[in-house]
Image (spheres, helix red, strand yellow):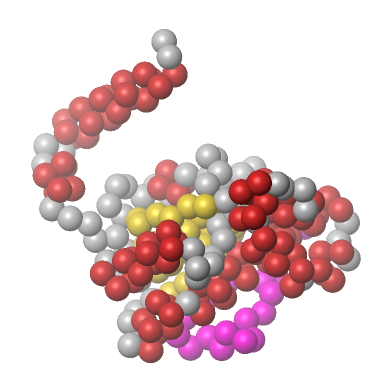
C-alpha cells in the first residue's frame, strides 16, 4: 500500500476511537480553542510538540520552522504570535530547540545553500554573538551548545517584539520559556525564563546542560 494511505487509515481509526471514548469530543472541538500555550519549535519530524508533552488537540497553538528562529519581519511567525497573545491570550510561550538540530549544525558549518542558507542567517548571527564560547569548546560539543545559545537569543528576540512588549506593558500574564529537547532520552531541559520584569539587556547565557 502506498504510504500516504496509511495516514488516512490511521486518521479514521483515531477519529473512531475518540468518538467512542468521548461521544461529544468533536462537538467540543468545533466550539472553539482556548490553548494556554504557544509553542515555537523546530520543524524537525522528531520533535512533535503535542506528543512529547502529552498535550491533547486544543491545548497548544503551534509554530514551527527550521531551527526555531524568531524574526520580527517573518510575517508567518508574527501573525501566529499576534493571534496567540492578543486573541487567544496564551499565558506561556515556549521556544523549544533540540540537540542534534540539523539547522543549527548547518549554521555552525556555514554550508547551507538556497532558501535554507538564507533562512539560517539568523542562526549564524547567534554563532557570531557567541563565537568565543563556541570556539573554546571541543569540536564535538559545539553544535549542541549552539542549540542552547540559540534558544537564549531567540527568546530575547521574542521578548523584544512589539507584540510581547505591548502585552508586558498592559500587564497581561505572560511568561516566555526557553527549553531544549533531548532526542536521546525524550526529555525537555528547561533553560531559562523571561517575564515582564526581566531586564532584556542583561539576560545571561544559560548554564550548559549538555556538554
Ligand atoms: Zn532542528
Q: Position of residue 135 (x, y in %)?
A: 87, 64
Number of numbered tags placed on the structure image: 0
In the image, 115 versus 46, the foreground residue is 115
Task: Identify which residue is drawn at 36% across, 19% down.
Answer: 5
Picture coordinates of residue 22, whole percent (x, y): 16, 38
Residue furthest to the front:
114
Task: List the single residue furthest toward the top.
Answer: 1
Start and end of the magenta stretch? 191-211
Q: Tell me what residue is drawn at x 16 percent, y 33 percent.
A: 19
Task: Estimate the x, y position of residue 199 in percent, counting from the top left.
Answer: 56, 88
Is residue 210 covered in magenta? Answer: yes
Residue 6 in the image: above or below residue 193: above
**Residue 83 appears in the rendering:** yes
Q: Quadrant of the N terminus?
A: top left
Which residue lies at the image location 47% right of the left edge and 44% below the top edge? 48
Residue 187 on the magenta span: no
Q: Quadrant of residue 3?
A: top left
Identify the main secondary structure in magenta: loop
Amino acid at each position: 500500500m502506498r504510504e500516504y494511505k496509511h495516514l488516512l487509515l490511521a486518521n479514521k481509526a483515531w477519529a473512531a476511537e475518540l468518538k467512542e471514548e468521548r461521544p461529544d469530543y468533536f462537538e467540543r472541538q468545533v466550539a472553539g480553542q482556548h490553548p494556554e500555550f504557544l509553542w515555537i519549535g523546530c520543524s524537525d519530524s522528531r520533535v512533535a510538540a503535542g506528543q512529547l508533552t502529552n498535550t491533547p488537540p486544543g491545548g497548544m497553538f503551534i509554530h514551527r520552522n527550521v531551527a526555531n528562529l524568531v524574526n520580527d519581519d517573518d510575517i508567518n511567525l508574527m501573525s501566529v504570535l499576534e493571534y496567540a497573545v492578543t486573541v487567544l491570550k496564551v499565558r506561556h510561550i515556549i521556544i523549544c530547540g533540540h540537540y542534534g538540530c540539523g539547522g543549527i549544525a548547518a549554521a555552525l558549518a556555514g554550508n547551507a545553500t538556497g532558501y535554507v542558507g538564507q533562512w539560517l542567517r539568523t542562526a549564524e548571527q547567534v554563532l557570531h554573538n557567541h563565537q568565543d564560547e563556541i570556539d573554546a569548546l571541543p569540536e564535538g560539543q559545539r553544535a549542541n551548545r549552539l542549540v542552547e545559545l540559540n534558544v537564549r537569543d531567540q527568546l530575547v528576540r521574542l521578548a523584544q517584539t512589539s507584540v510581547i512588549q505591548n502585552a508586558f506593558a498592559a500587564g497581561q500574564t505572560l511568561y516566555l520559556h526557553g527549553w531544549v529537547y533531548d532526542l536521546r532520552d525524550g526529555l525537555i531541559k528547561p533553560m531559562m525564563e523571561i517575564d515582564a520584569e526581566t531586564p532584556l539587556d542583561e539576560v545571561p547565557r544559560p548554564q550548559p546542560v549538555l556538554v
